[in-house]
Image (cartoon, rainbow, N blue to C red):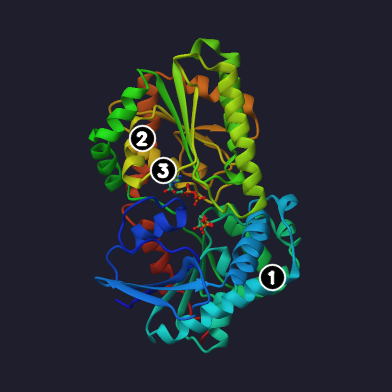
């Protein structure tokens, strides 16, 4: 089998340990477990050092480059997170465009191409990930790369009219013509992207490959984690109350303020639940250098304080709030102990937390997933209680339904979703994408 070369901005650690808050690294960690591969990307550090740091464990090699602080500011903080992220999540009002950032972003993509090229073998399959690296394939082709190139978009793609607000959107779309196959999370994303490409006369095929999880392995790990001391201590601290759990990177796409307001509405409109439930929201700080994210943190700190101030009893804290990451092993245990998962992004490519919660639940007494209509996962998770995440009242009503849901209905809903997750099999997502890429015509290299 040909070597797989993965390229992404963020790279998972070679050894699976510690927190990995981010769907891309979690999904890929699973995907590349057994295959010979080279993973090229940003080290997460800034320095003036140019050469990649190369390390190998078994048949997996990583080549990581540092960014200079200027590259980091223009490419990552600027163009990726201040512009592309809000645009792709249908939040153009939050996007800030600066020409220098676009240029910095292109320069980093060119640098990725230049530094990756000497590491490539002729028969490699290259798989580029996410919006940070939209033009990378075009730069690789310019430099003479003839390998098969796939691209996967982990985040949503908005309707072409929204995307067109981006200055030089057409040039970006034409760059995608250098790719042999593009994968998206949902049919809507594929349709929007195909339409946008067609308008520019670009014929790259676009397919739908929803990111999954290894449900059976996650279930086993969660069952083991639930027996460990830290989970048991946590479970005991709930004092027999039902646990509502939310866990997300602290990102404005996740609908966190609306979510905690929904919980506050539950306590207000359904006072019978006061003192009977605890809501734990974990939201590790993400992209803390971006203004919108700093503002969100301030808003959340204030909201959580206000809600607790209003509803807490001397022996009951209604809303527990932590901005520290939770180690992955522990997270599985918490997801198992939870009675309700509150997953209410305003817009999300997929949302793996929704799938992890279902996988972690005990089959004999499963909890209830409350899921936003606007998460990619909503397409697949038919057993979830669906909500419009913009409406705190609707969140409160869904919480009341979930708290009161009889066991038989919980089992039925959970079974539907678990079976679907398990049917995809471990690494079904990457296998089906790579198989399709293998079949794709070499549209760009003849
Ligand atoms: P995104 O890619 O936008 O971060 P996803 O829900 O698809 O969203 O993926 C997030 C991944 O990161 C999941 O695997 C989840 O378990 C993990 N994660 C999210 N929040 C935390 C946290 N507080 N601590 C540890 N892991 C987290
Ligand atoms: O899943 C979408 C995504 O943007 C990934 O590309 C990224 O790794 C993850 O969210 C976390 O964001 P960041 O890498 O900016 O911390």
What residue did someone put label 1 on?
102
* Residue 164: percent from left, percent from top: 74, 62
89, 428: nearer the viewer: 89
Give the left or right position of residue 184, taking residue 201 as reference: left
**Where 232 sits versus 125, above or below?**
above
- Pointer 2: residues within 10 angstroms few (<14), some, or many (20+)? many
Q: Which quadrant, please, contains the N terminus?
A: bottom left
What residue did someone put label 3 on?
355
- Pointer 1: residues within 10 angstroms few (<14), some, or many (20+)? some
* Residue 217: percent from left, percent from top: 27, 47
Dot 1 or dot 3: first in sequence order is 1
**Where 340 sits versus 55, above or below?**
above
Q: Is residue 11 visible?
A: yes
Give the left or right position of residue 240, taking residue 182 as reference: left
Displayed quadrant of residue 163: bottom right
199, 231: nearer the viewer: 231
Dot 2 or dot 3: first in sequence order is 2
Q: Nearer the viewer, mark 1 or mark 3?
A: 1
What residue did someone put label 2 on?
334
Q: Which residue is drawn at 60% across and 18% down?
A: 310
Dot 2 or dot 1: first in sequence order is 1
């Amino acid at each position: 089998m040909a070597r797989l070369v993965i390229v992404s901005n963020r790279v998972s650690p070679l050894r699976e340990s510690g927190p990995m808050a981010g769907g891309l690294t979690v999904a890929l960690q699973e995907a590349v477990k057994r295959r010979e591969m080279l993973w090229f990307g940003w080290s997460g550090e800034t320095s003036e050092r140019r050469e990649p740091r190369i390390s190998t464990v078994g048949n997996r090699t990583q080549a990581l480059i540092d960014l200079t602080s200027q590259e980091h500011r223009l490419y990552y903080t600027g163009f990726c997170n201040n512009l592309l992220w809000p645009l792709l999540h249908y939040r153009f009002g939050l996007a800030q465009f600066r020409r220098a950032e676009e240029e910095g972003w292109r320069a980093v993509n060119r640098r990725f191409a230049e530094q990756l090229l000497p590491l490539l073998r002729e028969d490699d399959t290259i798989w580029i990930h996410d919006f940070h690296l939209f033009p990378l394939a075009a730069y690789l082709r310019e430099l003479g790369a003839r390998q098969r190139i796939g691209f996967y978009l982990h985040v949503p793609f908005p309707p072409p009219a929204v995307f067109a607000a981006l200055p030089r959107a057409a040039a970006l779309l034409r760059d995608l013509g250098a790719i042999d196959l593009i994968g998206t999370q949902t049919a809507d994303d594929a349709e929007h992207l195909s339409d946008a490409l067609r308008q520019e006369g670009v014929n790259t095929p676009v397919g739908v490959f929803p990111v999954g999880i290894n449900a059976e392995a996650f279930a086993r790990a969660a069952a083991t984690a639930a027996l460990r001391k830290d989970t048991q201590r946590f479970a005991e601290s709930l004092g027999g109350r039902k646990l509502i759990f939310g866990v997300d990177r602290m990102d404005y796409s996740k609908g966190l303020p609306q979510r905690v307001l929904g919980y506050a509405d539950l306590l207000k409109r359904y006072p019978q639940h006061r003192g009977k439930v605890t809501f734990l929201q974990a939201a590790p700080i993400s992209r803390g250098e971006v203004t919108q994210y700093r503002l969100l943190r301030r808003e959340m700190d204030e909201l959580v304080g206000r809600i607790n101030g209003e509803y807490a009893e001397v022996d009951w804290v209604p809303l527990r709030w932590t901005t520290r990451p939770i180690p992955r092993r522990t997270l599985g245990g918490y997801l198992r102990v939870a009675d309700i998962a509150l997953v209410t992004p305003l817009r999300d490519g997929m949302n793996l937390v929704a799938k992890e919660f279902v996988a972690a639940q005990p089959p004999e007494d499963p909890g209830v997933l409350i899921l936003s209509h606007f998460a990619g996962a909503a397409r697949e998770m038919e057993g979830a209680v669906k909500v419009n995440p913009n409406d705190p009242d609707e969140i409160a009503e869904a919480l009341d339904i979930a708290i009161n849901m009889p066991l038989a209905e919980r089992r039925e809903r959970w079974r539907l979703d678990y079976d679907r997750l398990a049917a995809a099999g471990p690494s079904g997502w990457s296998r089906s994408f790579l198989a399709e890429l293998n079949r794709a015509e070499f549209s760009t290299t003849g």
